[in-house]
Amino acid sequence: QVQLMESGGGSVQAGESLRLSCTVSGDMFNSRFTDSLRWFRQAPGKGRDLVASVRHSGTTTYADSVKGRFTMSLDNAKSTMYLQMSNLKPEDTAVYLCNLKSYTNVNYWGQGTQVTVSS
């Protein structure tokens, strides 16, 4: 069974940094059945937006709003994905969720971690 567990959220001031972690259990992290590993965020009253993703091919993409400030990385030995967030802004405030998508379009989600940025 695939499970994703996030950590690392919190409350910071604008301009500060945070690193989110998401550990994946269930042998899917580096599996040939996995299409992509992704980070999403959902602000209050808004939809879920894609923040960053890494395809199985290694291609990494970012939302325009976070380019140059956020970096997604993987540690295959620890089955963990990270989202390093720098120069945080109040508009980055949201619940951040990690996601694993299989090639059969099955999505697995973490429980979410709150990031709050105050000005």
Image (cartoon, rainbow, N blue to C red):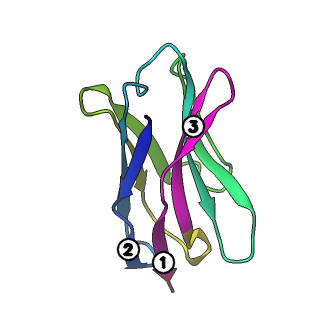
- State the separation of the CA atoms marked 1 and 3: 22 Å
In front: 118, or 80? 80
- Mark 3 element type: strand
Tag 1: Cα neighbours inside 10 Å, few (<14), some, or many (≥20)?
Answer: some
Mark 1 and mark 3 lie on one chain; the one further toward the N terminus is 3
In front: 64, or 73? 73
Residue 110 position within the rendered picture, expressed as x and y whole percent measured from the top left: 48, 52
Residue 31 position within the rendered picture, expressed as x and y whole percent measured from the top left: 44, 18
Q: Is residue 63 left or right of residue 98?
A: right
Three-letter code for the amino acid on which mark 2 is drawn: Gly
- Residue 53 lies in magenta, yes or no? no
- Magenta-colored span: 95-117
> Can you identify the residue that label 3 sits on?
53
Quarter of the figure with residue 38: top right
Give the residue at x 45% y 45%: 71
Tag 3: Cα neighbours inside 10 Å, few (<14), some, or many (≥20)?
Answer: many
> Can you identify the residue that label 1 sits on?
116
- Mark 1 element type: strand
- Marks 1 & 3, CB-CB < 8 Å contact: no
* Above or below for 37 versus 70: above
Q: Residue furthest bottom?
A: 119
- Marks 1 & 2, CB-CB < 8 Å contact: yes
- Mark 2 element type: strand
Mark 3 and mark 2 lie on one chain; the one further toward the N terminus is 2
Give the residue at x 51% y 86%: 119
Residue 111 position within the rendered picture, expressed as x and y whole percent measured from the top left: 48, 59
Q: Which mark is residue 10?
A: 2
